[in-house]
Image: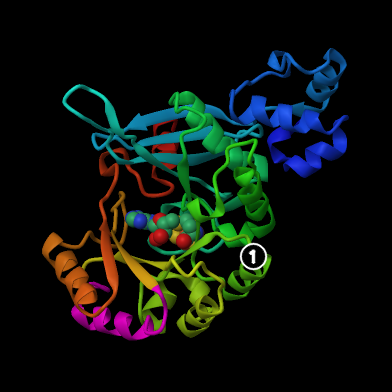
Amino acid sequence: MKKTILDLTKDELTEIVNPSFRAKQIYNWLYQKYVENFDEMRNLPKDLRESLSEKYVINPLTIVRKEQSSDGSIKYLFACQDGYTVETVLLPMKKEERDSEGNLLKETKYTICVSSQVGCKIGCSFCLTAKGGFKRDLTPGEIVAQVLSLKKDQNIPSNRRVNIVYMGMGEPLDNLDNVAKAVKIFKEQDGLSIGARRQTISTSGLSHQIAKLGSMDLGVLLAISLHAVDDELRETLMPINKAYNIESVINAVKAFPIDQRKRVMFEYLVMKELNDDLKSAKKLVKLLHGIKAKVNLIYFNPYPGSPFQRPDEKTMEEFKAYLNDHGITCTIRQSKGLDISAACGQLKEKTADESG
Ligand code: SAH
Ligand code: SF4
């Protein structure tokens, strides 16, 4: 199986192509013109195109399935070269706005939610990705290819900026080297040009890896999947809490370098009658004291056989109001694409069911 050229940062590419300006040209073909074939790179000499295509493939992913939700989010299931599948979701954040004459006032903003592993080792009890176990890490190029394939398939112009959240399948900090490399490849000026402050890494709370990510000084934003405010409950939901308890996660966040204008996002998955009470909200306020934080409440998204239930709207609103009243910015993540089984792992599961 050939490697993908999308695994290479521009520096790495520069080391293997001569003269070095070729790397810039290749990046341009790949990430701005979306070509899928080395032969289309017309300004490269033929022997270079041939030697590249002997060694590399361009896009290692193929689209297996695509589902559009009524709210506009689109979920993709991709197959890797070895047949494993991963999910990626496109979330149009704001609709485009036009004036009465049809002139464009505001462009649609996109966020793309990428997977970092096939499966996951962490084993959270509410998460469908965990059920299938862990298969393997994605390579940097397989992470990058999710965004590239999606932009190409949706005809999103290359210069249209997108935000990236590492909130698909897998634990990004359990595949930190490849994820860090993907962050760099996304950032490249001649490539997709997605700055680090438009990339958010979400973690279940691997404290020592949060420290390592911090020391890499990539400039990315951090999201913590907290979901519970006391260790006892968090352990039952997220076994990783036995190794890294809430205190260790909070300390790692406090030490994490972050742009003063930005905040650390805390994700709180709300499950009916489990963690949706105001006592928990109160504890959460205490826990986040001294951190520039924002909280994102997520409705638990049930799947067949799931042990938890979706909370009521009223409870969610009260929880949110409590946080906002106590100085913590809090939003409720609108369940994008509930009708297309949008929480991570759910499209994959569906496809497996249907194929028997
Ligand atoms: N492993 C990382 C990133 C991927 S999980 C992490 O856990 O942060 C991305 C998000 O999907 C997490 O916040 C997780 O809580 C959420 N999620 C998992 N199962 C869900 C479900 N059934 N309903 C709603 N959100 C879910
Ligand atoms: Fe892994 Fe995140 Fe799912 Fe937990 S919620 S099993 S860490 S993907």
Residue sitting at x 52%, y 72%: 240
Q: Residues within 10 Å of mark 1 (few under 14, many from 20)?
A: few
| Image spot of residue 277 (x, y percent) | 20, 77
Q: Check the image and report above or below for 233 versus 151.
A: below
**Foreground residue among 348 and 35:** 35
Residue sitting at x 51%, y 80%: 254
Left or right: residue 70 versus residue 5 is left
For the N terminus, give its image quadrant.
top right
Left or right: residue 187 versus residue 289 is right
Query: Which residue matches tag 1?
Result: 217
Q: What's the magenta region? A: 273-292
Residue 257, visible in the rendered structure? yes
Q: Check the image and report above or below for 52 versus 226.
A: above
| Image spot of residue 278 (x, y percent) | 19, 79
**Foreground residue among 8 and 135:** 8
Amino acid tagged 1: Asp
Left or right: residue 42 versus residue 129 is right
